[in-house]
Image (tube, grey):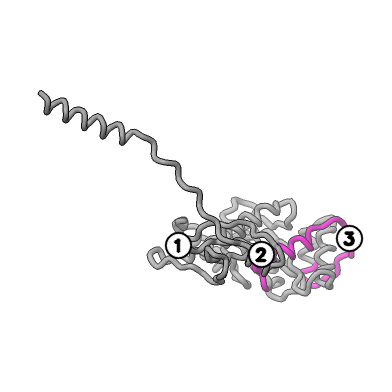
């Protein structure tokens, strides 16, 4: 009988211990940011979080992803690749940031050319009025739309703020019919010069922040950026393949 009571007591103790809540998790340690901020003239990162590699921290600064050592002495610029999944974890993170930044702009601040029927894919394009391949892409807008692709234009006058291309972009934005004015400007026709409250400078600066270096630069729904012109049929195939990919694991 004594043995039975002893066994019961041990089982009760074990079940009680198992039922106890786990201790609260220890907050993640933060790296020393003093050296990094000094090098950046006091600029503060947008976010800091532990990276997948122990001892490194992911630092988001503008559109950049950096990796910082815990003591704040070393910064790594480069991509982290997962050899198991073959994912580029850094590029996935950049894509996530691009997607959020683009959606924050809002379609009311874009010039949009949408299909008459259903929209299969949406592509956001940083464009320049005078860019040759931008003009070629726009001349095929009907073909893109037939593929079910909605094109959303953001401004990226490559020669910078105050340039001739910048002024043309402002004129298109301030026109009574922005779609018509965009098509005329892309054909090299004159668009009446107007000024108004416009998003051209803000979008140009956003493009710089997101790593746009030339036009056209295409941002897919996944946040992936494709630099350069892609023909309509090829773009539709690429978008279908991108959509079929399994979501990247964090």
Q: Give left or right: position of 239 versus 5.
A: right
Q: Residue at x 50, y 48 (%)?
A: 27
Q: State the CA–CA distance, disc 2 to disc 3.
A: 39 Å
Q: Which residues are magenta?
A: 185-213
The foreground one among 98 and 230 is 98
The residue wearing badge 1 is 54
Q: Position of residue 173 (x, y in %)?
A: 81, 59
Rendering coords of residue 222 (x, y %): 55, 58
In the image, residue 205 above or below residue 249: below
The quarter of the picture where residue 172 lies is bottom right
Residue appearing at x 75%, y 73% in the figure: 158
Q: Disc 2 designates what residue? A: 37
- Residue 98 placed where, x, y %? 62, 60
Label 2 sits on a secondary structure element that is: helix
Q: Earlier in the sequence, mark 3 or mark 1?
A: 1
Q: Quadrant of residue 13?
A: top left
Few, some or many C-alpha atoms within 10 Å of disc 3 (few <14, some 14-19, many ≥20)? some
> Which residue was labeled with disc 3?
195
Judge whether residue 31 is colored magenta. Answer: no
Dot placed on the residue nearer the N-terminal end, 2 or 1: 2
In this rendering, the label closer to the viewer, 2 or 3: 2
Q: Residue at x 78, y 74 (%)?
A: 159
Report the residue that reaches farthest toward the left: 1
Work out whether residue 16 or residue 114 is closer to the camera in this orientation and state it: 16
Establish if 30 lies above or below 140. above
Quarter of the picture containing the N terminus is: top left
Is 184 in front, or is 130? 130
Q: Earlier in the sequence, mark 2 or mark 3?
A: 2
């Amino acid at each position: 009988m004594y043995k039975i009571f002893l066994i019961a007591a041990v089982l009760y103790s074990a079940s009680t211990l198992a039922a106890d809540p786990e201790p609260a998790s220890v907050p993640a340690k933060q790296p020393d940011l003093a050296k990094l901020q000094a090098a950046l003239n006091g600029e503060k990162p947008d976010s800091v979080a532990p990276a997948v590699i122990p001892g490194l921290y992911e630092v988001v600064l503008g559109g950049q992803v950096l990796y910082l050592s815990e003591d704040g002495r070393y910064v790594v610029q480069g991509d982290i690749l997962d050899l198991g999944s073959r994912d580029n974890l850094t590029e996935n993170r950049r894509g996530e940031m691009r997607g959020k930044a683009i959606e924050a702009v809002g379609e009311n601040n874009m010039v949009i050319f949408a299909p008459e029927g259903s929209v299969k894919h949406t592509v956001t394009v940083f464009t320049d009025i005078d860019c040759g391949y931008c003009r070629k892409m726009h001349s095929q807008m009907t073909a893109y739309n037939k593929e079910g692709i909605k094109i959303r234009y953001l401004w990226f006058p490559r020669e910078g703020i105050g340039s001739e291309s910048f002024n043309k972009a402002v004129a298109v934005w301030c026109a009574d019919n922005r779609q018509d004015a965009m098509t005329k400007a892309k054909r090299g026709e004159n668009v009446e010069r107007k000024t108004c409250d416009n998003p051209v400078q803000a979008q140009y600066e956003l493009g710089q922040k997101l790593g746009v270096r030339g036009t056209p630069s295409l941002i897919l729904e996944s946040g992936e950026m494709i630099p350069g012109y892609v023909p309509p049929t090829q773009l539709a195939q690429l978008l279908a393949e991108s959509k079929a990919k399994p979501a990247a694991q964090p």
